[in-house]
Amino acid sequence: MKVEIVTRRRGKEAVVEYDYQPRDEDEKPMILDVLLQAQVEEIPDLAFRYGCRARNCGVCTVDVNGRPRVACRARINEGDRVSPMATLPPLADLVVRRDGVARQMRGRLASAAQGNDLNVEAPEDYHALTACIECYACLHECPMHARNFHGKAPADISTGDQADPAEGYRWGNPFSLLKLQRIRIDPLTSDTGKEAALDHSIELGLDACVGCKGCKCGVGINLMGKVVQPMLEAAGDRLGNTN
Ligand code: SF4
Ligand code: SF4
Ligand code: FES
């Protein structure tokens, strides 16, 4: 099975064609199987990330034919092209900088639990949102996240003009909204904490969600129904003054 792997060295992209040798004739390999074999057989310094190999850690996400896929759990087909996630700045080969998203939430996630009843059961939606594996597939085609790169691809932006991931991105994304919505519906969060989480979602650019065709989660969480819509409803007419 021939596939294309996009490599990136010292800022220059190249496409390497790799001929995957199946372990048996019925094998339908995952993307990660191909990358691991390519590294052993032909490209020893091929850079990519993986951890759990069980769709738990979320670090293995790459693009296949331009759409994000969790590499350890998504199958690859003849002729597919594997490239780094287009939504985050590339580092080397298939590795991108992930820190800008995590740093965006720095100092914001401490749940303010003062005085709340620890015996209150969390609502079902809260548990649904804990299924997030932080794979960042949902950044794909998110207009809010795209504001960080002035609508361009992160790979095409010169270093000086780029939002600095080390500072945390200015504008949000579906994952950050999910984290904030989880805080809002956590029974341990105080009313002040819930308000602060909503305020933060508005600061991150919740207005971009108005009229957006919507985000899709890599593991099937209903982001529009369980995250975006409830936040838009809670924000009401507060949107539109964030630029
Ligand atoms: S609905 Fe909001 S979070 Fe989802 S893709 Fe659109 S702008 Fe991004
Ligand atoms: S919300 Fe879904 S797509 Fe986004 S980071 Fe979490 S698991 Fe991945
Ligand atoms: S290696 Fe952990 S989710 Fe793929």
Image (cartoon, grey):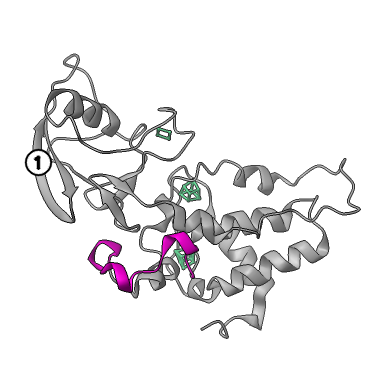
Q: Does residue 224 appear in this view?
A: no
Q: Is residue 130 toward the left or the right of residue 224 in the image?
A: right
**Residue 125 location, x and y as percent?**
67, 48
Disc 1 designates what residue? 16
Residue sitting at the far top: 24
Residue 74 in which image quadrant: top left
Identify the residue shown where x is 51% and y is 75%: 210
Q: Is mark 1 on a helix, strand or loop?
A: strand
Which quadrant does the N terminus fall into?
top left
The magenta span reads 153-170
Q: Which amino acid does label 1 sit on?
A: Val
**Residue 2 location, x and y as percent?**
9, 33
Q: Is residue 243 magenta?
A: no
Q: How many labels does the image show?
A: 1
Mark 1: few/some/many CA within 10 Å (<14, 14-19, 20+): some
Q: Is residue 95 toward the left or the right of residue 230 in the image?
A: left
Q: Is residue 159 magenta?
A: yes
Task: Establish if 58 lies above or below 158.
Answer: above
Task: Establish if 224 lies above or below 204.
Answer: above
